[in-house]
Image (spheres, rainbow, N blue to C red):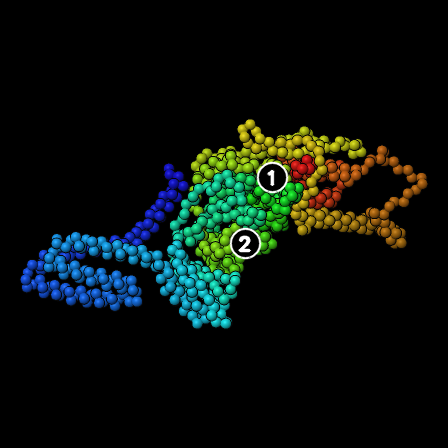
Amino acid sequence: MASKSSSTSKALERSLSRRVDRQWLSRGLPMAAPWGLAVVLILLIALVHDLWGGDALVTPLVALFMSALGVVVTGYTWIAAGNRPHLRLMATISSALVTLALVVGLIVGFGPMWQVYAMVAFTWCVCWDIRHVMKWANEEKVAAANGLARLGEVVEAEKFSWRKIKATGKGIVKAEVIATAPDATIGEVQDMRERMETAAHLPVGAVTVKRDPGNAARGLVEVMVDDLLAVPVPWPGPHRVGALISDPIPVGIYNHGEAVEVYVTGRTEDVDLEHLLAMGVSGAGKSFFARVLVAGMLVRKKVTVWAIDCKGLQTFGCLAHGLDWLITDYKEARKALHVMANVITVRTNKLAEEGLDRWSKKSSLNFLVVWIEEAADLFASKNAYDEFVRKARSAGIMVVSSLQRATHDNLSTDARANHGSGMCFGVRETADAEFALPSEVVDAGASPSWRASKPGYAYLAGLGTDPDDWARPLRTYLAGKAELAAAVTAAVGVRTPLDETTVLSAGVPYANRTVYDAPIGVETPDPAPRTVATVPPAPAPVVTADPAAERPASPTLRMHAVRTPGGEDEFAVDDGTGDETEMFTDPEDVDLMSMQAEHEISDARRDLEEALAEAENEHLADVDPAERAELRGIGIDTPLPRSEDMELSFGEEETELTPEQAHAVIDRQLHEWIRTGRTTFGVKDLGDLLEALGKSRRWFYHHRDDLMEQGVLAEGAEYGTYDILRSPLEPTDPVAA
């Protein structure tokens, strides 16, 4: 059974073959026409000589008649050529030569004249071919000039003038439009692009009009007269394998034929990365672009890619063995998003220690790319997402948010504004493009309203590309999953392992990630994924029966990466000492659990008051009203009067735990749960422990807030649950360890 990639290759070959056939018909036949006419003329000379040659009476009369016809045809050719001097000269001379050859051949036959005929015919056929070549080189300019003449009528010729019409030879015609009237603006030309395309019979989006930043009265017009992107361009393979991630990565071609090269860390020597917002309807080609760009990253040094795609393995399955962390589960994605706050804090602290204001290739940290497919699925974690996107750049983390439509209900306006680069594939309407592209690019003519009818077509603004190309359509490379997987496999020795600083800061969610040893979905047996887990430490101390007893200090744990004999990365947990690193994560705006606890207390108090009122009516009905009023003033908080004769004995007085000791007990419980593989819990799971400590749920909520601020806990996927991101007893920074 043929592979999917071979089927794609055959389809490309057929498409290219059809394009070559069309090229042959449109360009080859005119080149061959003069030579074919020269051969036909030989047969015609032989025929007229055989019919009328050699007769003393008939031959002169036919020769005179043919000469008269030749003069008429030559004269008409001169008139029909019009004001085109080269064509008029070539056509007139050709007509005269044909007439002369027929008359001479009629009289003497072809035999005596073949040598002269061959030399003249060869020379004249070559001249015609040269003219055809020159015509094709200039035909775009001629066609565009005629089209621009019609465009000038649409754009009000008395207010604007066209200058410097130039054909690039690659399907693009460039020109300048100058506002000559005082009240004319280039914005008027931009508003009439659709009318211009209609007048020149061009496809939608074929005309772009960009303002000249240095001259408000000047606009730069580009007209696409031939779509060079109609045939998909195969992926040329991995580019600069083993180079640093700061080098450019080609991902497709522009409509003028040049390669689209992106700089994920910024184009200048001083790294100034930009987050990328990729947008387009389903089927527009976002997945093809994602695989090509990620594969280009995975063959470079000092870069690590984490991918989140809750749809499953369809997009990144073929690259799974090269991704350091591939998340396909929604709950795991939420945990990863919450732990990113700690990753950012620890990485920025590390960069500060290295004397860097931003990530640089000189840093010991890897450049980290977090690619999030269908980012709208994580909108429930809006606050954490917004903070992550806002702070990630300073930590050397690039965020790619890919979704179908970046409206405010799918991606907050703050998060969208923090994406410095935008790539827009096909959308439902041009107005949607403004969610991903700068307004000036859309005003210039970027109109990706083709939906899914042109897979791979897109506009790209940012990622180190030339601003002059932002309003120019491009098409991403077409790559088969098998060849992408093979390139990533071959680069296994090139990729730089993730630095220890980031490993430790990512905590339990990263340590328990699923790792793939081979690609998925490329007609190879699916590998059994393995889950990397921390090595359990020694049993943690348990709560003693006597709360007053002194509790032994729990060990400080440190997780670090180790290399197994087989060359794979595993993780271990060692005892160590050091201060815990202060962390920060996004607190929820409203503490729902605290509000619920307050409501429960209020309900209980109301029930108690109702019960006391019923008891009063039942047992104190005969008591004097004054005494009842005095008794009614005694509440549940009123201290009982003590008598000197009253002796109360409750046995040995228990020593109450200090807040720090109670917090330590809760922390050890969380650590114990992590040690046994449990990463989610509810408050009810702490019921017995809180009762033994003599603490209420409300007390725990205060400690919970501290743990969330430290990056230990995060709100769970279900109401009233919490995710444990790391053990509160483990350091997260190798420096602190």
- Dot 1: what SS? loop
Q: Residues within 10 Å of mark 2 (few under 14, many from 20)?
A: many
Q: Earlier in the sequence, mark 2 or mark 1?
A: 1
Question: For mark 1, what is the residue?
Answer: 364
Image coordinates for residue 43, horizontal then vertical, percent: 15, 55
- Describe residue 431's horizontal placement relative to residue 79 as left or right: right
Question: For mark 2, what is the residue?
Answer: 406
- Describe residue 553's horizontal placement relative to residue 326 as left or right: right
User: Looking at the picture, does residue 415 appear above or below residue 6?
Assistant: below
Q: Amino acid at mark 2?
A: Ala
Image coordinates for residue 45, horizontal then vertical, percent: 14, 57
- Dot 2: what SS? loop
Image coordinates for residue 271, horizontal then vertical, percent: 57, 47
Q: Does residue 207 show up?
A: no
Q: Quadrant of the N terminus?
A: top left
- Describe residue 710's horizontal placement relative to residue 549 as left or right: left
Spatial CA span between label 2 and label 1: 35 Å
Q: How many marks?
A: 2
Viewer-nearest residue: 442 or 86:
86
